[in-house]
């Protein structure tokens, strides 16, 4: 459904450190950088990108917005969460764990990146 997702930052190097670590736990290679300094993380299913806002205004995180990354199992979600905390992220929501929902059992881990964007590792449990 999505070709790419892009979030804003005021500190590209802090974002690179954070996302290289958390996305690395998912097997996604380190960012490539374009001529504008934007960070691109390429996967077979889409692109995740980080940029300074093109309009020159400060970056801001969306209130109520979350970007979810699919993970293979709870251990990967835990590694993803730990990598984020160790590289400038902050935990948010409940601690990583199983949640019951109308979509079944989910294993979720939430973080805020160094710019305040809320991201999640999600594993759909069988």
Image: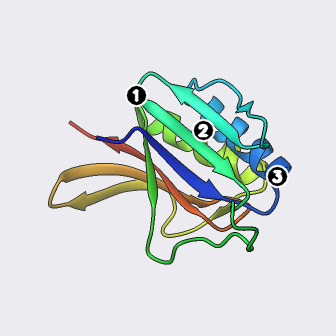
Q: Which residue is mark 3?
A: 14
Which percent across, then down, holds residue 80?
Answer: 59, 41
> For the residue carrying disc 3, how many other residues have a C-alpha within 10 Å: few (<14), some (14-19), or many (20+)?
some
Question: What is the quadrant of residue 27 in the picture?
Answer: top right
* 40 shown above or below 117: above
Question: What is the quadrant of residue 48 in the picture?
Answer: top right
- 2 or 1: mark nearer the eye: 1
Q: Secondary structure at mark 3?
A: helix
Q: Which residue is mark 2?
A: 79
Left or right: 103 as drawn, with respect to 8: left
Mark with earlier residue (3, 2): 3
Q: Label for residue 45?
A: 1
Q: Secondary structure at mark 2?
A: helix
Q: Residue at x 74, y 73 (%)?
A: 58
Q: Residue at x 65, y 30 (%)?
A: 24
Q: Secondary structure at mark 1?
A: loop
* 108 shown above or below 46: below
Q: Nearer the viewer, residue 115 or 91?
A: 115
State the CA–CA distance, disc 3 to disc 1: 25 Å
């Amino acid at each position: 459904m999505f070709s790419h997702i892009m979030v804003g930052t005021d500190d590209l190097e802090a974002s690179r450190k954070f996302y290289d670590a958390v996305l690395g736990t998912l097997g996604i290679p380190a960012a490539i950088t374009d001529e504008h300094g934007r960070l691109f993380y390429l996967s077979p299913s889409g692109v995740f990108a980080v940029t300074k806002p093109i309009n020159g205004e400060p970056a801001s995180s969306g209130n109520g917005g979350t970007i979810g990354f699919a993970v293979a199992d709870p251990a990967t979600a835990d590694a993803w969460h730990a990598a984020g905390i160790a590289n400038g992220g902050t935990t948010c929501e409940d601690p990583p764990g199983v949640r019951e929902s109308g979509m079944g059992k989910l294993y979720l881990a939430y973080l805020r990146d160094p710019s305040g964007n809320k991201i999640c590792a999600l594993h759909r449990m069988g």
